[in-house]
């Protein structure tokens, strides 16, 4: 089941304010931070924080339940690239501060959509349009295996998401997760991965790790 099963519904006043911003000749993705949009941003954050049960859409770590500093409103298709999707409910979720800082404005569409031509303004309706694991369209566990702070891809989409958000950042920074310290073979493979300079060798180690983690 996808992480998000319900999308936010804006009120009439919300939609009127959003439309007033869109009608401006100077409207750009930078308008997201406008002071008058603060209530809408807060409403979006609150809705998806609850809908996602306090879980980051990309790393599945915790997001803050009170503070906004670790519960960032995420535009899955970046608002800097897809301006017309800036307030699209299906394009919104919440993520942790690290995933927000790392993913930023990376392209996530399989084929870039021209949202400025006037011909294509509809948000994609299926998983196949996205390279990244989409919290509304995808079952996370079908694409990524998460064991503690270690992430192993189960699909090309999983591999893209792990890379785009650097999900193995703790593993690369601090080494083996405490969850695995009693498994000598697993620890050895992880340490070998960290020390390897060969892309080919790392790929082989990841395949072995994937097999080992699936059997835990």
Image: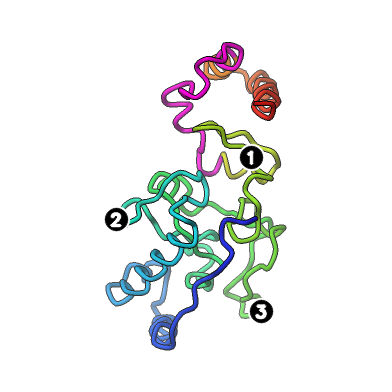
Q: Relative to the observer, which residue lies in front, 51 or 149? A: 51
Residue 166 part of the magenta-drawn span: yes
Nearer mark to the viewer, of 2 and 1: 2
- Looking at marks 2 and 1 on the same chain, the residue that comes earlier in the sequence is marked by 2
Nearer mark to the viewer, of 3 and 2: 2
- Secondary structure at numbered mark 1: helix
Q: Which quadrant does the N terminus fall into?
A: bottom right
CA neighbours of label 2 inside 10 A, class few (<14), some (14 to 19), many (20+): few
Residue 116 locus on image (x, y percent)? 57, 74
How far separated are the C-alphas under marks 2 and 1? 30 Å
Contact, CB < 8 Å: mark 2 with mark 1?
Answer: no
Q: Which residue is pictured at 43% across the width and 88% down the height? A: 12
Q: Which residue is pictured at 62% across the width and 56% down the height? A: 2
State how the image is colored. Answer: rainbow
Q: Indicate whether 49 appears above or below 203.
A: below
Q: Name the residue under label 2.
A: 67
Q: Mark 3 points at which residue?
A: 119
Q: Mark 1 points at which residue?
A: 159
Residue 95 locus on image (x, y percent)? 44, 52
How far separated are the C-alphas under marks 3 and 2? 39 Å
């Amino acid at each position: 089941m996808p992480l998000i099963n319900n999308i936010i519904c804006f009120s009439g006043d919300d939609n009127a304010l959003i439309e007033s911003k869109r009608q401006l000749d100077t409207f750009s993705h930078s308008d997201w931070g406008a002071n008058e949009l603060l209530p809408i941003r807060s409403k979006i954050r609150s809705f998806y924080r609850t809908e996602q049960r306090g879980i980051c859409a990309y790393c599945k770590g915790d997001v803050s339940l009170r503070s906004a500093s670790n519960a960032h409103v995420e535009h899955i298709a970046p608002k800097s690239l897809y301006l017309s999707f800036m307030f699209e409910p299906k394009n919104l979720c919440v993520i942790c501060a690290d995933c927000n800082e790392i993913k930023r404005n990376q392209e996530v569409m399989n084929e870039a959509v021209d949202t400025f031509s006037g011909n294509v303004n509809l948000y994609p309706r299926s998983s196949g349009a996205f390279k990244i694991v989409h919290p509304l369209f995808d079952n996370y566990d079908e694409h990524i295996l998460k064991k503690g702070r270690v992430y192993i891809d189960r699909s090309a989409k999983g591999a893209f998401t792990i890379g785009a958000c650097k999900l193995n950042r703790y593993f690369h920074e601090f080494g083996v997760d405490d969850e695995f310290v009693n498994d000598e073979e697993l620890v050895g493979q992880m340490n070998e991965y960290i020390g390897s300079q060969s892309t080919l060798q790392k790929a082989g180690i990841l395949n072995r790790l994937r097999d080992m983690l699936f059997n835990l």
